[in-house]
Amino acid sequence: IQELLRVMRTIDDRIVHELNTTIPTASFVGKVDPGQTCKELYQSLMDAHTNRERIIKNCISQTSAVVKTLKEEREKAHEDAALLKQLRKEQTKLKLMQSELNVEEVVNDRSWKVL
């Protein structure tokens, strides 16, 4: 998931470059509609933010359900080491996903400040 998010954050990482190439120079003003181009860039950025947030929240929801199930199983089988190991793994994964949501907020804020 982290690799997928890294690829999906490319637009945010390159926002300054995108703005520089979106706004036409004086020689290209008549050939390109800067308003439409900026609108398309804005919409692309909005779509990217929405999609990433949806993916992260979906992963959090799924992992939370797995953690809940494992906790319930753990209450029934206190001595199961494999179950405990799986629970710890899923809890770590859940924390990672929750931290990705915080990272997403920072990335989004940074991108909007540039605009």
Image (cartoon, helix red, strand yellow):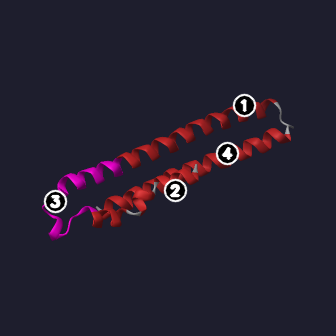
N-terminal label among 3 and 4: 3
The one of 9 and 40 positioned closer to us in this rendering:
40
Which is nearer the eye, 103 or 41? 41
Q: Are marks 2 and 3 in contact (CB under 8 Å)?
A: no
Residue bearing the label numbered 4: 91
Q: Residue flagged by tag 4: what amino acid is it?
A: Gln
In the picture of the structure, the residue carrying the numbered disc 2 is 6
Q: CA distance from mark 2 to mark 1?
A: 34 Å
Q: Amino acid at mark 1?
A: Glu
> Which one is in front in this view, the residue at disc 2 or the one at disc 1?
2
Residue 5 higher or lower than 73, as above or below: below
Q: Earlier in the sequence, mark 3 or mark 1?
A: 3
Q: Reading the chain from its start, which is encountered first: label 2 or label 3? A: 2
Instruction: Spot the residue most to the bottom.
Output: 26
Secondary structure beneath disc 2? helix
Circles 4, 2 touching at the beta carbon (< 8 Å):
no
Q: Amino acid at mark 2?
A: Arg
Q: What residue appears at the point 27 percent right and 50 percent down from the top-left corner? A: 40
Q: Nearer the viewer, mark 3 or mark 4?
A: 3
SS of the residue under disc 3? loop
Give, as a single range, the part of the protein colored magenta. 22-46
Q: CA distance from mark 4 to mark 1?
A: 14 Å
Category of crowding for the residue at label 4, using alpha-carbon neighbours closer than 10 angstroms: few (below 14), some (14–19), many (at least 20): some
- Tell me the residue that label 1 is attached to: 72
* Mark nearer the viewer, 2 or 3: 3
Quadrant hosting residue 107? bottom left
